[in-house]
């Protein structure tokens, strides 16, 4: 019985860790997209003012 409980707890901990990692990687991807968009927008504005 104790072994089964340990397996279940281990499985749930793994799921939590995987979920946290997925959230962190998705957050990083969203931040990269937003950062890239902001940089390109500022460069585009500078280019338009110059031209």
Image (cartoon, rainbow, N blue to C red):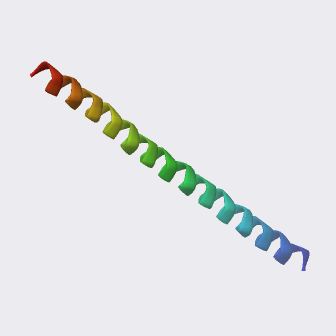
Q: Where is residue 13, by image quadrant?
A: bottom right
Q: Nearer the viewer, residue 25 or 10?
A: 25
Which residue is pictured at 77% across the width and 73% down the height? 8
Q: Residue furthest right?
A: 2
Q: Residue furthest left?
A: 51
Q: Nearer the viewer, residue 6 or 46?
A: 46
Q: Seen in the image, is 51 located left or right of residue 41?
A: left
Q: Quadrant of the N terminus?
A: bottom right
**Image x and y of residue 48, in percent:** 15, 27
Which residue is pictured at 79% across the width and 68% down the height? 9
Which residue is pictured at 51% across the width and 49% down the height? 27
Q: Seen in the image, is 46 located left or right of residue 33?
A: left
Which residue is pictured at 85% across the width and 74% down the height? 5
**Image x and y of residue 7, in percent:** 78, 71
Q: Nearer the viewer, residue 26 or 18?
A: 26
Tell me: residue 39, above or below residue 8: above
Tell me: residue 31, above or below residue 21: above
Tell me: residue 10, above or below residue 49: below
Q: Seen in the image, is 36 located left or right of residue 2?
A: left
Q: Residue furthest front?
A: 49
Q: Where is residue 43, by image quadrant?
A: top left
Q: Where is residue 10, by image quadrant?
A: bottom right
Tally of numbered tags? 0
**Image x and y of residue 21, in percent:** 58, 53
Q: Seen in the image, is 14 located left or right of residue 48?
A: right
Q: Nearer the viewer, residue 28 or 39?
A: 39
Q: Residue furthest top?
A: 50
**Image x and y of residue 16, in percent:** 68, 61
Q: Quadrant of the C terminus?
A: top left
């Amino acid at each position: 019985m104790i072994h089964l409980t340990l397996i279940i707890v281990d499985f749930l901990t793994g799921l939590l860790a995987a979920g946290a990692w997925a959230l962190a990687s998705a957050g990083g991807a969203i931040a990269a997209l937003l950062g890239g968009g902001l940089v390109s927008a500022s460069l585009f504005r500078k280019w338009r003012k110059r031209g």
